[in-house]
Image (cartoon, rainbow, N blue to C red):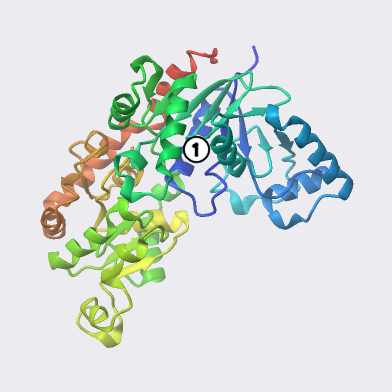
Amino acid sequence: MRKPRIYIDGFNLSLEQGTGVATYSRNLSFALRDLGAEVGVLYGTSASTISFYSLIREIAFFDPRVGKPSWLADQLMKFWRAMTLPFGEIALQVPMTGRVIRDTFRARLPYFDHIWNIQGLYEKQELYGRWFGRRMSVHFLQSPDIMHWTYPLALRVSKAKNIYTLHDLVPLRLPYTTLDNKRYYFRLINRLVKSADHIVTVSEASRKDIINLFGISERRITNTYQAVDIPARYRNKPISDVKSDVEGTFGISYKKYFLFFGAIEPKKNVGRMIEAYLASGATDPLVIVGKKAWKSEEELRLISDNDHVRYLLTNGNITERRFRVMQLDYAPFPLLVSLIRGAKSVFFPSLYEGFGLPALESMLLGTPVLTSNTASMPEVVGNAALQVDPYDTRALVEGIRALDSDADLRGRLAEAGPIRAQEFSPERYQARLADVYGKFTKLPQ
């Protein structure tokens, strides 16, 4: 019996610094491997992967500076696309021979049996969805049994069952926190819930939102949650090495700082978190690791380059430049794991999350977590994290003070976190996925 072919998209996997959806996609690819599926990943890189030479096609996948294809190949492809545009796009397989050394990308690559690409696919699908009001068709020489889109996209694979993951409805529930075109987003979601073979989501909170806002039948939507998993080589790194990482790289002491990691945007509530931290009187520094996104300047206004504020953010000696708040755009994954493990507590007071993976990753590593009591967070963290109202600055202040001063509370949460995280183990996640895929294809026993 052949393996079932289950493909996923690489929409977020091509982002250099990754996103929560990128982590979701990578975890999904490894879960598919462990379920015995033949895994394909469909990318939409900007570089042309058209060439008579397989090595050039392989290079083009990893480096957009490969150069333009030959005039003849370019003209043939333009003619082919013009002829087939009404019928969709054809995916071309990318050779993965190992001739290009890809160790640099090891942490970002998903599991795959083969890679496919359509140049500029994800920009095209949005234009197609806006112009024609329907999903663009994607064709493979041999269609998968299931195409699992990890994000709401105006795409479908012909001759396959199309499943879509809707992580949350933040652009509709908290429209003022995102830059999405809300009309287009609403039309797209409405189209997907009506035409998809199945909808997957990642929490009961999100499932209820999708049912309530779009009236989808409960039988056509499944909550699989997510998997939380961190490689053992990082999870079990000796404490002495963790201390060296955080102290040598940042000049901060092990278990003597607080940490936030994630995108700096309105939904993440970073501005209110900083305000509460400063008001709490805690003297251990706050480390913020995250890429600046929409309205990040407003979120970081209290630590902007201002002499008066800069003085307030020191530990009493301005000449030492020992800031109480440190902001970093990025940390490599191994270093980020050390930062999480070395933190006194992780703050994750997001206004709304479909799942909230950073909180669960921190709990898995045994670091106490302060998080929100809204959306999915209560069902995900249970009693293993300190929950507060993310809109109430005073509640945040009291929560920070409690974690700063109460060693017994930190100890209890550090013990409870890994136990709670096991509810979202890769094995349990695979079982939930198998229930969904089993509706459409036969999985190996």
Rendered location of residue 334, percent (x, y): 45, 55
Toward the viewer: 93 or 391?
A: 391
Quadrant the N terminus occupies = top right
Rendered location of residue 226, percent (x, y): 39, 33
Q: Judge from the rendering whether residue 86 lies leftward or rightward of residue 130; answer left or right.
A: right
Task: Give the amino acid type for the residue marked by disc 1 in the picture.
Answer: Ser
The image quadrant that residue 136 belongs to is top right
Q: Residue at x 42, y 46 (%)?
A: 180
Q: Residue 308, can we see it?
A: yes
Q: Judge from the rendering whether residue 414 lies leftward or rightward of residue 399; answer left or right.
A: right
Rendered location of residue 141, percent (x, y): 73, 25
Which residue, given by chain and number where applicable, does mark 1 sit on? Answer: 25
Q: Residue at x 42, y 26 (%)?
A: 200
Q: Specify few, some or many for label 1: CA neighbours under 10 Å numbering under 14, 14-19, or 20 or more.
A: many
Q: Residue at x 36, y 62 (%)?
A: 296
Q: Residue at x 63, y 18 (%)?
A: 159
